[in-house]
Amino acid sequence: KAGVTQTPRYLIKTRGQQVTLSCSPISGHRSVSWYQQTPGQGLQFLFEYFSETQRNKGNFPGRFSGRQFSNSRSEMNVSTLELGDSALYLCASSRGERAPETQYFGPGTRLLVL
Amino acid sequence: AQTVTQSQPEMSVQEAETVTLSCTYDTSESDYYLFWYKQPPSRQMILVIRQEAYKQQNATENRFSVNFQKAAKSFSLKISDSQLGDAAMYFCAYSNRDDKIIFGKGTRLHILP
């Protein structure tokens, strides 16, 4: 079974721009979660999508948004980029059966905002 | 709110020795999972081991085992016969029914040859 894939792997943007990151879950997984990883804050939960609906949300500003498609692939968008948005963005997939589950992570997209 | 605390930011162990990484958590839930994830430098986060809260038996995966103390809300990871490939950041994590993982700050493990 193919693992979680994320594209692109690396991105360089400038302040004020917007960016879209993509995540393809493991086949059969319907839940996709997004996390931001920075040296200072560690790993922080952004949001989770299940069956094209946002099911859970972390404490991030509205500049961070996402969506999920019918094939369970998910995109995350960050608008009006700030320097502090530089981070490794990880997505993770699971079956989403509303029980404690193991999430499987992708390799991440490293975003640098200049 | 649930929290996960890893009190050891960094640890070192001699190759072939045993090391234990500490983790405590706080929750009022009774049904949850605990995980240890490994993130090698510039590489993908991978699951090392997981423990279901309802199981009293400690989980084991080859050289990796946990000491799960539910009443004390403690979940430590023991790595036996440490190998150079074990060098990584280790994250303790918690998940309950809402499918959100809460991570600790991580412990960077160095393996000394």
Image: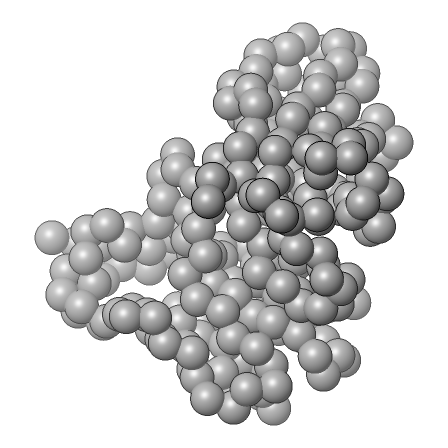
Q: In this orientation, which residue lies closer to the viewer: B18 or A102?
A: A102
Q: Is B73 rendered above or below residue B94?
A: below
- Residue B95 versus residue A50: which sits nearer the camera? A50
B37 relative to B41 in the view: left or right: right
**Which colour assignment does the render follow?**
one colour
In which quadrant of the rendered image does the C terminus of chain A lie? top right
Q: Is residue A44 above or below residue A5?
A: below
Residue A51 x, y percent position in the rendering: 81, 45
Residue A108: x and y in percent read 53, 33
Residue B34 % position (x, y): 56, 70
Residue shown at 71% from the left, 68% from the top: A99
Task: Report which quarter residue B1 is drawn in.
Answer: bottom right
Q: Residue at 55% x, 20% y: name it.
A: A8
Q: Residue at x 67, y 68 (%)?
A: A100
Q: Left or right? Give the position of B8 relative to B82.
A: right
Residue A50 in view of the camera: yes
Residue A38 visible at all? no
Quarter of image, res A34: top right
Looking at the image, residue A31 sits to the left or right of residue A105; the answer is right
Reply above or below: B41 against B82: above
Q: Relative to A86, does residue A61 appear above or below in the rendering? A: below
Q: Residue at x 71, y 35 (%)?
A: A71
Total labels drawn: 0
Percent x, y for residue A16?
Answer: 78, 10
